Image (cartoon, coloured by chain):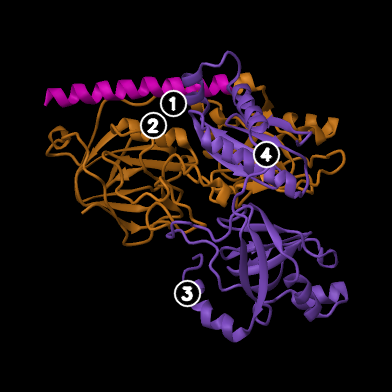
Chain colours: A orange, B purple
Amino acid sequence: MGITVIKPGLLGTIQDLGRYGYGSLGINSSGAMDRYAARVANLLVGNQQHEAVMELHFPGPQLLFEQNAFISITGGNFSPTLNDEPLPLWQPLLIRKNTILHFPGLRYGARCYIAIHGGFDVDPWLGSASTNLKAGAGGFKGRKFEKGDELLSREGPLYFAGWMKDWKDVVALNWRADTTSVYRYPHEIFFTAGHEHSLLTASATKDLVSNNFIIRPFSDRMGYRLKGPLLESAGTAELVSTGVSFGTIQLLPGGELIVLMADHQTTGGYPRIGHVISAHLPRLAQLRPSEAIQFTQVDHAIAESLLFRMENDLQILEHSCTDHLNTRACKV
Amino acid sequence: MTETYHIFPLGDGAVTIDLGNNISEALNNKVLAMQHWLLAHPFTGQLDIVIAYSSLTVFYDPYTVSNFYHPPGLVSGYVREILLQAFRQSGEHILANEETVHIPVCYDPPFNPDLRSLAHDKQMDAEEIIRLHTEPTYRVYTIGFLPGFSYMATVHDSLVTPRKPVPVPVAAGSIGIAGAQTGIYSLNSPGGWHIIGRTPLKQFDPGSPSLVTLRVGNIVRFYRISTTEMEQQLEPVLSTGNK
């Protein structure tokens, strides 16, 4: 008894905040593309931030809840609908058993996350529940969801059945996460200079920050190919393979750019002209092919302070979610 | 002592120390020594270490580092100091993984799709290429690209060849040449290396405790096996390959 996948949708996997410690064996961290959305989803249902969540792409799946569940849906808005009732995002939801969750329309965003109170019951691989599709390991059987899969959740500490209403399929609890600061300017992406940034010619340096770049089709969890002015570099850097990270902006031989995303390789040989700041990875993860990016170069002080602001906001959210849930639990 | 190094941030969650942009056993030994030092002296917030030919990158959680150490300046500056310490306090060389690993390779069809074209390009006999490939020992310098994909060097001068312009599908176990490197595809994957043979030895197994067959620092020697020997051992490799 759990959640049964009636239709799998485009790409649904189990992810958490990534698998660390095995990079030197070529095993990359994987993990949720939009870690902010994954963390908030967990906080809303009283989980630890690093608990495993579902990451869904559009077209989304059809999911049958075979038991009552306490869930939240965050990230991209694919018009989540329970039977015929539209559901709010970024809000705790009590779902009655024998209902079907589906996603009839894409409104915005590229990835949607579902957290369930207690967490999904998957076996961790190397300390993480993230699905590594290349390795065929981690998450749910090391692969994306398929028709007929049954996902189980662990029992959580909250007795939420008492909060449900007999005549309703869904009850939305009356608090929601404020995500404005994270997604308000979705196309504005800050980066810090990479070690090979100085290879760019003066005009390419200017082109990088004064033009829009469009995300190409087939951009995925591994990386985003960008379409924009071709950037010229002075001389070529023949690099032996070296470290890259989530958000690294690489310059390809023809002058195009690629931004490495959650499933990137552990090492690469292309010049690293920049790195998207961690605080802006969530908004980048929510951009789809054909959407535009406007790059702005910032220094490390700004990168760190924006990240710390996001982390502080998450701490505050964690406390208020705990307070709300405790108050609610005491009332019953 | 290694004379030159560059330490620079790789975004806001990682710092790299680069000892020089080349393939050298001494630099790779120093990289291994620094990795061992960091694993023995981990800092709070340290997440992962990626080692490459001549560089080491440490990944960290900036918020955790900041809250634990309260560095006066930037967190990336604080981690930079730790890498400097790793550079200064680690030795030049660490005795790790230096055993020789013998890898069986079938250089016959259908496991050698690019051997003929390589022989043609180099105006050499295919047998000569096989002889030159099996003659030396190679060092594993880094593991990357795929889980368990080992980059080895250095191939005989006359075998050095640029990678293909466009990647093609490559089967797990394939042995390729690119530049002065040779390597083993650990999983089915697109790839641009010239494939001259295949090993039945599984290079990556998510269920095994060691995960991968080869480690950085290993010395590898390839030896030739027949198609019959290959096929006898091949079945388990194919049945557990990438889906």
Q: Residue at x 78, y 33 (%)?
A: B4
Q: Same subunit under labels 4 and 1?
A: yes
| Res. A89 visible in picture | no
Q: Are marks 2 and 1 in contact (CB under 8 Å)?
A: yes
Residue A235 appears left or right of A324 = right
C-alpha distance separating marks 2 and 1? 9 Å
Secondary structure category for the residue under label 4: strand
Image coordinates of residue A22 in percent, x first then y, are: 52, 47
Q: Which chain is home to disc 2?
A: A
Q: Are marks 4 and 1 in contact (CB under 8 Å)?
A: no
Could you tell me the amino acid type at mark 3? Pro
Image coordinates of residue A141 in percent, x first then y, are: 38, 58
Q: Which residue is mark 1?
A: A179
Residue A192 appears left or right of A96 = right
Given residues A30 and B83, the one toward you in this image is B83
Q: Which residue is mark 2?
A: A40
Q: Above or below — where is B166 with respect to A188?
A: below
Q: Which residue is mark 4?
A: A249
